[in-house]
Amino acid sequence: MKTTLLWALAIAAGAAGAADRAAPVADPLGLLGRHGAVALGAPALSQAVSAALLAPGVTHYTVLRGEPQAGKTWQLVAGVALDAATRARARDCLLGLGLGARMRSYRIAGAPDTPYQALAGGDFASLEAAAAAASRAAPGCTLAPRDRAEEADNRTGPWRVDIVALEPRMAGGHWTAAAAPDGARMRTSELARGAGALVAVNGGFFVEKEADGFPGQAAGVSVLAGRIAGAPVAGRPAVVLAGPSPVIADPFAWRLWLAWPDGAQTPLDGVDRPQGKVRNCGRGAGDLPIHDHTCDYADDLVIYPAGNPVAVRANGGGSRFALAASGALRELGPGEQPSPQEALLAAGAAGSRAAALRRQAGQGGRAEIRLETSAGSGADLLARGASVVNAGPTLLAGGKPVYKDAPQGWAIDATQEAAHRLLMHDWINRRNPRTALGVRADGTVLLVTVDGHRHDSAVGLTIEELRRLMASLGALDAVNLDGGGSSALAIRGRLVNHPSDRDGERKVGDAILFIPER
């Protein structure tokens, strides 16, 4: 293996004065030695590693590994197939263009009894050439251009990986999460600058389109410095930011309800989302998550806390109630809005939740909002100003690989939609930009971004490759965060990786931040 070591001799990111005379960078991950190769591709690949000390106990590594593929690397994918009939149709679509049909078998981790095949054909020099061929496909055939560099059998890469290793015992500060103040979206680097963060990465999954909810809202649990902004997706993990090191809770679950003086309880299904509409599904126990899919629920109750910016976008469908700080409840008439001091409750008009609220309002009962979580007392978490960021799939726990991709929402057969099945294949078993968080046995926190969709310089990782990478870096526990065009790493508010969107850094729902002591 040819390895280039690029030592940074001073504190990075614009430091001056005494920093110019700083000691050589510490190497907590051992990546700067002769054998400091990351676990990507063939063992003998060339690798260049640079490291910079951001602050005591905080080191930023950049790893460039492998070589670009040469020649015609684009192909057309004819979707994924779970049965012989679908395989035959996909093959016919490729043969109809005079292309061969290459077939490979895959599985989604956690679903060992559901193998599937992906069929592809053709060898094209560019995306444009592949797309032109796809446009000539027979009616009923949908062929998607994909670069073969993103297949896991490409052993040369290339890859770009950015890693921040933060040792909490040496780095004074605290962890938190932040989102746009108006409930919309902001870039990770903007959120980092606004909070004075030393390091930040993009956080959890979020809604992008109006058809799926409020753009920018969390598509899973979200607690921002003690403020609840999103409910959990059943069976999924989350990152809890409430101490010196983040904690990966798998799964993260809660009970959020209204408690009444007569002992009755009214469960609250959602927070800050359109009533009846849940992105990524998994509204409660027994309801399976489905990633990048929106489920509709008739009997649904959503709360918009008082003063929350999302409340102004709440839809007016169903039955609506105002909840005062005192616990007093009143039903709102058509077009009537709660006061700024009242929370808004939106319930399906014909559901049991609306009937329960109407009955309690008529009896003059006063509600108390209660929260219990799988990560400890809900009241304690909120009082401490903790943050919680949705995530998944889980990668490692206790130093061992975790294979729950399918039950956490990435099953290949979760829907009957061909487009969704291809999306799940691409999401898990093809290479994409990724963001991950890990914690080593000594408490060192790893923030990792992997560039992708830049086929000449960075091909990204499959979820299994990300799992192996985090293990090779010494993570005891690790989890995947939102990725793709959202993947971003900011140091002192400056973006340092290369997001894949053509427009540059994407606006995201939230970000995980490390704020140094002043």
Image: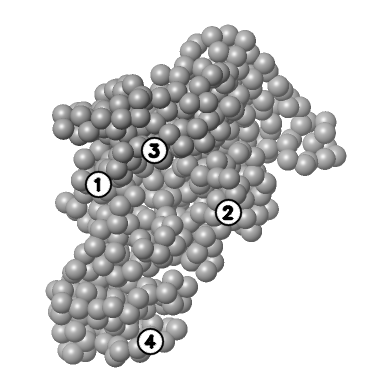
As measured in the structure, the alpha-carbon distance from the residue carrying label 4 to the one carrying label 3 is 54 Å
Q: Dot 1 surroundings within 10 Å: few (below 14), some, or many (20 or more)?
A: few
Sequence order check: which comes first, mark 1 or mark 4? Answer: 4
As measured in the structure, the alpha-carbon distance from the residue carrying label 2 to the one carrying label 3 is 39 Å
Residue type at mark 2?
Arg
What is the quadrant of residue 172 in the picture? top right
**Residue 4: x and y, percent?**
67, 16
Instruction: Name the residue at 42% across, 60% down.
Output: 209
Q: Nearer the viewer, mark 2 or mark 3?
A: 3
Q: Which mark is residue 458?
A: none
Q: Is residue 206 above or below residue 313?
A: above
Q: Is residue 486 left or right of residue 480?
A: right
| CB within 8 Å, label 4 to label 3 | no
As measured in the structure, the alpha-carbon distance from the residue carrying label 3 to the one carrying label 1 is 23 Å
Q: Which residue is mark 2?
A: 187
| CB within 8 Å, label 2 to label 3 | no
What is the quadrant of residue 248 in the picture? top left
Dot 1: what SS?
loop
Sequence order check: which comes first, mark 2 or mark 4? Answer: 2
Q: Is residue 220 left or right of residue 494?
A: left
Q: Which of the image's four quarters has the N terminus?
A: top right
Residue type at mark 1?
Glu
**Residue 423: x and y, percent?**
34, 41
Q: Which residue is mark 1?
A: 417
Sequence order check: which comes first, mark 2 or mark 3? Answer: 3
| CB within 8 Å, label 2 to label 4 | no
Q: Which residue is mark 4?
A: 337
